[in-house]
């Protein structure tokens, strides 16, 4: 009885390696974009949760909180911060958030995504009339190109009319009621 043992040829192995390489070249950038988008969504959700907590406090007490401890939301992994009059900053391992209850009345949170500081900012409903419905997606970059710009453009929607890039920052802004 003759047993036929045959392995793969070099050509077959090269074709398989080529196919795996092409799939990896497509999948890895998509994976990185999904991770960046997930980090952005965390940043945006935390900003909105802190803003909503401050708004609830305002509705109950007819004033904004005097300290972070008066809010009913906790920044995960909080490592400290500082308070000064109507401005206070909260730090965690993942992000830094600043709440301003003075004349500006805004909150912004900063997170490092893809090696770039990414800022998401929104104004409180009691902010100045021109600002109260605005939210901002800000990048410390000089270019309108790149992964982070794409994330901001997706979040804002029609970004071509709503982007300002000057110096080292690009700002995408939109009305939160639309």
Image (cartoon, rainbow, N blue to C red):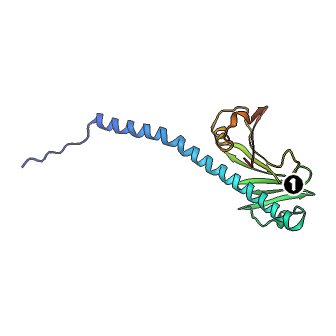
Quarter assignment of residue 58: bottom right
Q: Secondary structure at mark 1?
A: loop
Q: Nearer the viewer, residue 23 or 170?
A: 170
Q: Residue at coordinates 29% horizontally, 37% vertically from top-left?
A: 12
Number of callouts in the render?
Answer: 1
Q: Residue at coordinates 6% horizontally, 49% vertically from top-left?
A: 1
Image x and y of residue 101, in percent: 88, 55
Compared across the picture, whether 146 is left or right of 127 comes to left
Compared across the picture, whether 95 is left or right of 26 comes to right
Q: Residue furthest front?
A: 178
Compared across the picture, whether 29 is left or right of 16 comes to right
Image x and y of residue 152, in percent: 68, 42
Question: Relative to residue 84, is residue 140 depicted above or below?
Answer: above
Q: Which residue, given by chain and number where applicable, does mark 1 sit on?
A: 126
Q: Nearer the viewer, residue 164 or 125?
A: 125
Q: Residues within 10 Å of mark 1 (few under 14, many from 20)?
A: some
Image x and y of residue 57, in percent: 84, 65
Quarter assignment of residue 77: bottom right
Image x and y of residue 154, in percent: 64, 42
Q: Residue at coordinates 72% horizontally, 34% vertically from top-left?
A: 161
Question: Relative to residue 45, is residue 62 depicted above or below?
Answer: below
Q: Nearer the viewer, residue 14 or 106?
A: 106
């Amino acid at each position: 009885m003759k047993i036929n043992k045959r392995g793969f040829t070099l050509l077959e192995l090269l074709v398989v390696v080529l196919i795996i390489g092409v799939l990896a070249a497509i999948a890895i950038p998509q994976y990185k974009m999904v991770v960046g988008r997930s980090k952005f969504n965390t940043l945006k959700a935390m900003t909105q949760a802190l803003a909503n907590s401050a708004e609830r406090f305002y509705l109950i007490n007819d004033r904004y909180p005097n300290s972070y401890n008066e809010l009913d939301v906790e920044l995960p992994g909080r490592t400290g911060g500082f308070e000064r009059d109507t401005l206070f900053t909260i730090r965690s391992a993942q992000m830094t958030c600043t709440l301003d209850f003075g004349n500006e009345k805004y909150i912004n949170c900063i997170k490092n995504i893809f090696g770039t500081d990414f800022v998401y900012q929104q104004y409180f409903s009691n902010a100045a009339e021109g600002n109260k419905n605005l939210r901002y997606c800000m990048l410390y970059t000089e270019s309108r190109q790149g992964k982070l710009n794409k994330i901001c453009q997706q979040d804002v929607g029609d970004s071509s009319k709503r982007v300002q890039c000057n110096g080292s920052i690009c700002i995408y802004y939109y009305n939160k009621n639309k």
